[in-house]
Image (cartoon, coloured by chain):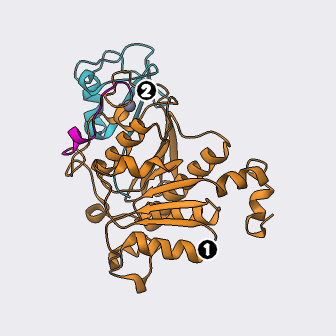
């Protein structure tokens, strides 16, 4: 037994068995921004054996108010590579694949193939729908999240266990239709809370504990400290991606903002 | 009465789109479930609440 995971061993929902599962699991984080920072550090600390982290951007000073996996010395460095460095400092025993490029309709399906669970830590709805559609097509479970100002939402998708993001929203919200962190602002701690919830969903899925946010949307507002969980149990039978055959990622390039 | 997000409201006969407007919901950022099924966006314009409807409305934000 590894001393590092002592507090997991005493949790009956994880225990030695669960820890073994975590150590042999692979989680892909798409985005090493605010959500990805929190989620990646907790997944690394929890001993998820392989973490993939994808981000094409470089660390900027305005990121450091919330993207706590990066630091001042890494300004200008690619975020996936910076995240890898921090993760390995925290837990050198795990394996990290850094992908310093953007996931697109060309490469996403191949990328998610080798992972057990995927986290949507990106900032635009275009990219969120690309992750949704690719995961649904590949029958991969993933955890969606979004956050702006003081509030955000989390929802988990697993094949056959409830709706996907496209069932819920229909078409991809276009830039200009929704507030961005850059212009509307975001509290670092709010992104941290939501990113930690994503990490918890991944861990629960991997060890088979508790109830996932499949068919449910959890929302929290840190200003009012109110939260709610809305149930959306059934997928939309007419959903073009999870309800029907023949959905093609490439035909939806424009929606994803490619 | 109509139950929206757990709250009973006297909305029977009222149009969904009017309710959404009054509560400043942006249609492209929400999901609506009525009596256990997701309401497709194409049905929003014609939908009126009926007595006993159980409705869930949730709005999403982007950002990450
Ligand atoms: Zn769907």
- The answer to whether A46 appears left or right of A65 in the picture is right
- Residue A246 in the magenta stretch? The answer is yes
Residue farthest top in this picture:
B51
Q: Nearer the viewer, residue A125 or A83?
A: A83
Q: Chain of mark 1?
A: A
Sequence-wise first label, 2 or 1: 1
What residue do we see at 81% from left, 56% from top?
Answer: A10
User: Whole-percent x and y of residue A258?
Assistant: 21, 52
- Specify the segment rendered in magenta: A243-254
Ligand 1 closer than 8 Å to label 2 CB: yes
Q: Relative to A53, does residue A92 appear above or below in the rendering? A: below
Q: Relative to A188, does residue B15 appear above or below in the rendering? A: above
The answer to whether residue A106 shows anywhere in this view is yes
Q: Relative to A239, does residue A158 appear above or below in the rendering? A: below
User: Whole-percent x and y of residue A234?
Assistant: 46, 25
Q: Which residue is mark 2?
A: A235
User: Whole-percent x and y of residue A67?
Assistant: 43, 70
What residue do we see at 43% from left, 75% from top?
Answer: A82
Co-location on one chain, circles 2 and 1: yes
User: Mark 2 falls on what kind of element?
Assistant: loop
Q: Nearer the viewer, residue A80 or A123?
A: A80
Q: Chain of mark 2?
A: A
* Chain letter, colour orange: A
- The answer to whether A205 appears left or right of A242 in the picture is right
User: Whole-percent x and y of residue A202?
Assistant: 57, 50
The answer to whether residue B61 shows anywhere in this view is no
User: Mark 1 falls on what kind of element?
Assistant: loop
In whole angstroms, how far apart are the C-alphas of marks 2 and 1? Answer: 40 Å
- Residue A134 in the magenta stretch? The answer is no
- The answer to whether A102 appears left or right of A114 in the picture is left
The secondary structure that dominates the magenta segment is loop
């Amino acid at each position: 037994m590894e001393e590092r995971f002592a507090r997991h061993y005493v949790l009956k929902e994880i225990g030695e068995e669960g820890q073994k599962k975590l150590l042999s699991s692979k989680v892909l984080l798409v985005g090493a921004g605010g959500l990805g920072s929190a989620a990646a550090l907790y997944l690394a600390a929890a001993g998820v054996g392989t973490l993939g982290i994808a981000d094409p951007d470089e660390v900027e000073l305005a990121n450091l108010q919330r993207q706590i996996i990066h630091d001042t010395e890494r300004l200008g460095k690619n975020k996936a590579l910076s995240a890898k460095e921090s993760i390995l400092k925290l837990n050198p025993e795990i394996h990290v694949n850094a992908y310093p490029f953007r996931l697109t309709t060309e490469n996403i399906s191949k990328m998610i193939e080798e992972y057990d669970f995927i986290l949507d830590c990106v900032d635009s709805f275009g990219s969120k729908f690309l992750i949704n559609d690719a995961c649904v097509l590949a029958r991969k479970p993933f955890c969606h999240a979004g956050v702006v100002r003081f509030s955000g939402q989390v929802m988990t998708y697993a094949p056959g266990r409830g709706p996907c993001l496209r069932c819920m929203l229909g078409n991809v919200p276009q830039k200009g239709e929704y507030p961005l962190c850059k212009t509307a602002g975001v509290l670092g701690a709010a992104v941290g809370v939501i990113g930690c919830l994503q990490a918890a969903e991944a861990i629960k899925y991997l060890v088979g504990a508790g109830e996932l946010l499949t068919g449910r949307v959890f929302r929290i507002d840190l200003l009012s400290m109110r939260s709610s969980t809305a149930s959306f149990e059934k997928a939309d039978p007419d959903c073009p991606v999870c309800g029907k055959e023949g959905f093609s990622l490439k035909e939806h390039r424009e929606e994803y903002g490619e | 009465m109509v139950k929206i997000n757990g709250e009973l409201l006297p909305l029977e006969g009222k149009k969904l789109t009017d309710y959404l407007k009054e509560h400043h919901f942006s249609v492209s950022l929400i999901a609506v479930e009525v009596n256990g099924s997701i309401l497709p966006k194409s049905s929003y314009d014609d939908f009126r609440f009926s007595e006993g409807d159980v409705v869930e409305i949730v709005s999403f934000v982007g950002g990450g």
